[in-house]
Image (cartoon, grey):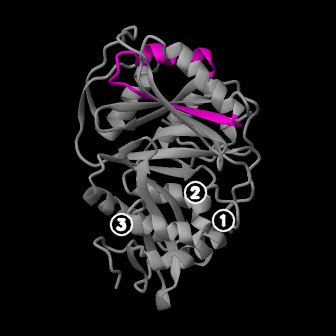
């Protein structure tokens, strides 16, 4: 029988066992990831058994594996804190060996990781799924996750999955699917006027209550608290504005210059919407080329994500979004902010809504 706290997925074989990953599983997991991705996975730590073993042993990763007959590792998924917001659990690296797909293993791994996230004290979970990987998207959606952000071109071009996808014609994009683990009602959230409706729609989908949505005030009272880093594996620059101060425009422009000079192809900006200065920062960011990407629910309020695609060309209509109406609405909103470079071929799979 399946050794998990959840029931087996429909159609799953009874000889599949889901359990927490142990440090000594690292070699088997790296072999699985090579079988699934070849050498194209941007998170290179999944190919390094020594590093992966250390991350599991230290508790940095709460990973789960699926075992087939004879203890063979046929599936893997990981849970860790989201970059810069450790109270948000980030699910990723969901992979199932090609010979074992279509048996509900992705959903079983996801349920195990959600249960692990509850015990870890995360306030919400978000799962990053590649738009070209339909099985991962479907597994996440079946577990009650909803699309709350789409990061266009946030991953390198050329990511492929054995037996599923070939290399993409543009940089790979990621959908963040989120799920709130306990009812959340936030206090004042300072929503940018032009994005107020789409943020409200996402919050309603998640079951998050925003008790007030006042417009912001000009930041005063000290310098801006900002952090930034460059991810060499993905070519993405990440920026966090913790608190907007009087110098928000200058420090934001400086961080953009620094990340561009380091080689960043895309930029991702995080803003705390419980900060009265956030709407002013949004205006400044849009003047620099950033566009709305979505939100994440955090401990003390909503996190607004913005992205800058000035160095690359992404056609949103070439993305594979499945049949999720909320995902299509969000993609349409994001796509309306940028100049489309072409149209996708074939029949439009989106539902009527």
Marks 2 and 1: which is nearer the front?
1
User: Which residue does the image show at 51% across and 50% down from the upper left?
Assistant: 128
Q: Mark 1 — residue?
A: 37
Q: Mark 3 — residue?
A: 112
Report the span colored magenta: 262-289
- The question of residue 270 being in magenta is answered with yes
Q: Quadrant of residue 31?
A: bottom right
Q: Distance between the residues labelled 2 and 1?
A: 15 Å
Number of numbered discs overlaid on the protein picture? 3
- Which numbered tag is attached to residue 134? 2
Say left or right for 292 vs 215: right
Between 238 and 208, the residue placed more toward the observer is 238
Q: Distance between the residues labelled 1 and 3?
A: 23 Å
Say left or right for 337 vs 139: right
Q: Position of residue 308 (x, y in %)?
A: 62, 28
- Which numbered tag is attached to residue 6? none
């Amino acid at each position: 029988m399946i050794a998990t706290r959840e029931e087996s997925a429909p159609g799953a074989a009874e000889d599949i066992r889901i359990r927490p990953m142990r440090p000594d599983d690292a070699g088997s997991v790296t072999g699985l990831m090579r079988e699934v991705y070849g050498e194209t996975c941007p998170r290179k730590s999944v190919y390094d058994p020594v590093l992966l073993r250390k991350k599991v042993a230290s508790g940095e990763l709460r990973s789960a594996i699926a075992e087939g007959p004879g203890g063979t590792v046929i599936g893997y998924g990981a849970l860790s804190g989201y970059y810069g917001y450790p109270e948000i659990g980030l699910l990723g690296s969901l992979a199932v060996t090609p010979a074992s797909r279509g048996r509900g293993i992705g959903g079983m791994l996801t349920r195990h990781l959600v249960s692990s996230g509850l015990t870890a004290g995360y306030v919400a979970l978000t799962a990053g799924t590649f738009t070209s990987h339909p099985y991962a998207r479907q597994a996440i959606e079946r577990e009650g996750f909803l699309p709350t952000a789409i990061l266009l071109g946030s991953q390198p071009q050329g990511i492929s999955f054995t037996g599923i996808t070939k290399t993409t014609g543009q940089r790979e994009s990621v959908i963040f699917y989120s799920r709130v683990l306990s009812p959340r009602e936030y206090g004042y959230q300072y929503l940018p006027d032009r994005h107020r409706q789409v943020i409200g729609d996402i919050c309603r989908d998640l079951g998050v209550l925003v008790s007030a949505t006042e417009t912001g005030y000009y930041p005063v009272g000290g310098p801006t608290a900002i952090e930034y880093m460059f991810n060499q594996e993905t070519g993405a620059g990440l920026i966090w504005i913790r608190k907007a101060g009087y110098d928000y425009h200058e420090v934001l422009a400086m961080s953009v210059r620094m990340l561009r000079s380091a080689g960043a192809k895309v930029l991702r900006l995080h803003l705390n919407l419980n900060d009265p200065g956030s709407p002013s920062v949004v205006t400044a960011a849009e003047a620099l080329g950033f566009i709305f990407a979505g939100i994440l629910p955090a401990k003390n309020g909503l996190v607004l994500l913005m992205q800058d695609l000035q160095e690359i060309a992404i056609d949103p209509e070439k993305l594979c979004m499945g049949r999720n109406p909320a995902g299509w609405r969000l993609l349409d909103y994001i796509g309306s902010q940028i100049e489309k470079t072409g149209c996708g071929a074939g029949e439009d799979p989106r539902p009527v809504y």
